[in-house]
Amino acid sequence: GPPFPVFTRQEVACHHSDADRVWVTYGSDVFDVTDFLELHPGGKSKILLAAGGALEPFWALYAMHKQEHVLEILQSYKVGEL
Ligand code: HEM
């Protein structure tokens, strides 16, 4: 497929609420998880803690995310790269 657009961490940080869309990063990938907020088993408020930034510090605490099926869900929301 075509290459993904490239964003800076500063651009990602602008997307930190429902109104501005909710973006997160994992590694060097960028995801728009706005449409997943209401589907998250851990609740919308938890994802909003990571909104606009990296998932790693949170997933270090909630290690149940480091499973194939969770990473597949995340991958389906990819919109770009850093
Ligand atoms: C559970 C996805 C971000 C906290 C889950 C589960 C999925 C998921 C699929 C169910 C896992 C399972 O039971 O096998 C995601 C995705 C995220 C994200 C795609 C990216 C935006 C976060 C963040 C936090 C968090 C940032 C914490 C700040 C939790 C908690 C649960 C959970 C506490 C357990 C809920 C329960 O079983 O009662 N997440 N998550 N998640 N997530 Fe997330």
Image (cartoon, rainbow, N blue to C red):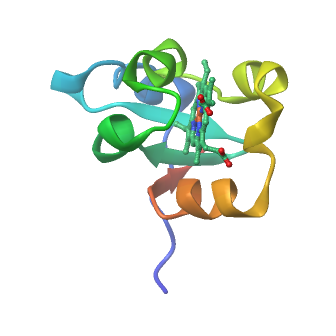
Q: Is residue 47 above or below residue 67?
A: above
Quadrant into which the C terminus falls: top right
Q: Is residue 72 above or below residue 24?
A: below
Farthest left residue?
19
Q: Residue 32: which quarter of the image? A: top left
Point out the quarter of the image occupied by ligand 1: top right
Of residues 70 and 53, the one nearer the viewer is 70
Estimate the x, y position of residue 65 in percent, counting from the top left: 73, 42
Look at 42% across and 28% down and name the residue there.
11
Q: Is residue 23 above or below residue 3?
A: above
Look at 43% across and 18% down and name the residue there.
48
Of residues 28 and 59, the one nearer the viewer is 59
Q: Residue 56: which quarter of the image? A: top right
Farthest bottom residue?
1
From the viewer's perspective, tell me whether residue 63 is left or right of residue 42: right
Look at 49% across and 54% down and name the residue there.
80
From the viewer's perspective, tell me whether residue 58 is left or right of residue 72: right
Of residues 52 and 40, the one nearer the viewer is 40
Look at 30% across and 37% down and name the residue there.
38
